[in-house]
Image (cartoon, rainbow, N blue to C red):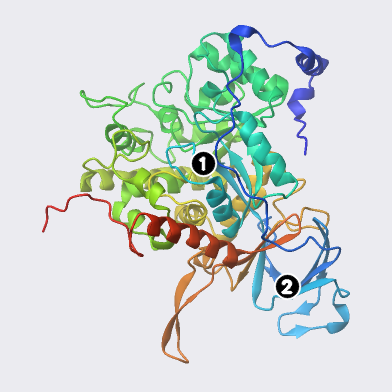
Amino acid sequence: MKIVRARMMRSLGGLALLTALATMPLPAAAAPASAAPIADPIPARTDGVGPYQRTVLRNVTIVNGTGAPAQGPFDIVLSGDRIAEIKSIGSPGAIDESRRAAPGDHEIDLTGHYVLPGFVDSHVHLHSLGDGQNVPSEYVLKLWIANGVTSVRDVGSSGRPIEWLVDVKRRSERNEIVAPRIDIYPMFQDILDKPVNDADTARFAVQEAKRRGADGIKFIGGEEDVLYAALDEAEKVGLRTTMHHAQQVVSYADVLQTSAHGLDSMEHWYGLPEAMFTDKAIQAFPGNFVNNDEQMRFGEAGRLWAQAAEPGSEAWNKVMDTLLERKFVLSPTFTAYLTSRDFMRMSRASWHDEYTLPALWDWYRPSRTNHGSYWFDWTTEDEMAWKENYGLWMRFVNDYKNRGGIVTVGSDSGYIYNLYGFGYTQEMELLREAGFSSLEVIHAATQAGAKALGHDDEVGTIRVGRKADLVIVKGNPVANLKLLFGTGTLKLNDATGQVERVGGILYTVKDGIIYDARKLRAEVRDMVASQKAERDIPPGPMTIEAVDLTR
């Protein structure tokens, strides 16, 4: 699907530039990064049934993603990869059989089930055996689909060529593999094989990303002239942009400055509180602070919001008003930092036992070299600071949503005890904690995410003519988002006196292909069990420490 941006068409200059790029030779001094294949083959798809000419999902309750309340009962008809009919069949407890959809060549009775649009994850990294996480890409992709994620924005990983991800994207579009739709936003500094240190090279790097199949660009830092030249070029060639505002650059590139230069969205929250400083220009770092020490970096990051303007103050509202006027998108990724405020909760989440590969567990362990493994000597004081940080951060994000701003659901999994797929549902719960209603959370996970990626004409809502991307769960996720977790939730059966585990997404539908999410989760559990057996690791929780000095 092509995205044509309105601002790209302000003049014929954009068209002329694209025409020139089509025939432009590559300068030898700025050759693109190597496209050497990654030794991590993603197997051909054997899961899923359909699409059928006429699939009928009977007796469903719909949450359509727009923010509207649940509606039903309905019969939904899928034709190929599209939603063909949404037929009201009466009211709860009073179904009118005469109003039913005509028979299909594949039908599922979904009485008691809710149907939501497929989820959009605005911040992912498709890790592979070539990354430090050392996980097969198949494992990541299946966890996403098994947890209802049908569209993702991959925001890059060092060392991964754009061409590799373009190939995965094309295979996903053809449904040759189990995978969500993929938008590709390479990290700006990784586009070329050499450092980008001047404006002309910055513009060429953006042009290269476009030529090689990128949908957008993710920035982290860069010299001021380089960054702003690249943002300007991205607008000219029609590439969307997002940014992790690294601490090294926020003194000249906070969120107000970057959005003024055309940045479309931000990841995490760095660069936002810095734009609201009233008694300083630079974050108050300790005298011994070294940014490359990740415990220092993340520890001080947890003390940043307290240095910004008070909620509701003039400076707070000025920043918010400006970002709203610019239709700026927030992708907060609350779950990416959740371990910082509660290490035990995240490191001992129940899904790790059966769904986290030992290789990924190795990456999570405290390490001076693995990104996000900064638990060298994490303290109660660090966690308390992060709890306060979350309160202020969540207040801004909730206020932004309340005033009409776009907020998406992004998981940033694969780091910091944050597991693919499961982290997405955690992010939904964290938005609920921030003050979103459950319907607002689902809207952020669906239509808002699709808008941020420019695909809301195809996905993100349940509507006739839209892509048949759906999440199907037994029970009411509006009343309890925990039903969406792959591990479900606990419920006491009063009739039997037994504690039961209920919920978990039942089916994920992408392009009209119906995936049994339970089967996909079982396949992932088998991968984990197999790797544990290879390493002689017993079933159950994996240890973190190598030596226990408390015994």
Q: Which mark is residue 72?
A: 2
Q: Quadrant of the C terminus?
A: bottom left
Residue type at mark 1 is Ser
Q: Is residue 363 visible?
A: yes
* In the image, residue 469 above or below residue 132: below
Give me the residue at 73% from left, 10% from top. Answer: 25
User: Which numbered disc, 2 or 1, marks the residue closer to the eye?
Assistant: 1
Q: CA distance from mark 2 to mark 1?
A: 41 Å
- Decide: few, some or many residues near mark 1? Use Cα within 10 Å; few <14, some 14-19, many ≥20: many
Q: Quadrant of the N terminus?
A: top right
Q: Position of residue 435 (x, y in %)?
A: 48, 55
Q: Is residue 327 visible?
A: no
Give me the residue at 71% from left, 69% from top. Answer: 71
Residue type at mark 2 is Gly
* In the image, residue 507 above or below residue 198: below
Q: Position of residue 91 (x, y in %)?
A: 75, 79
- Helix, strand or loop status at disc 2: strand
Residue to which mark 1 is pinned: 128
Among the 4 quarters of the image, the one containing residue 442: bottom right
Is 470 placed left or right of 369 in the picture?
right
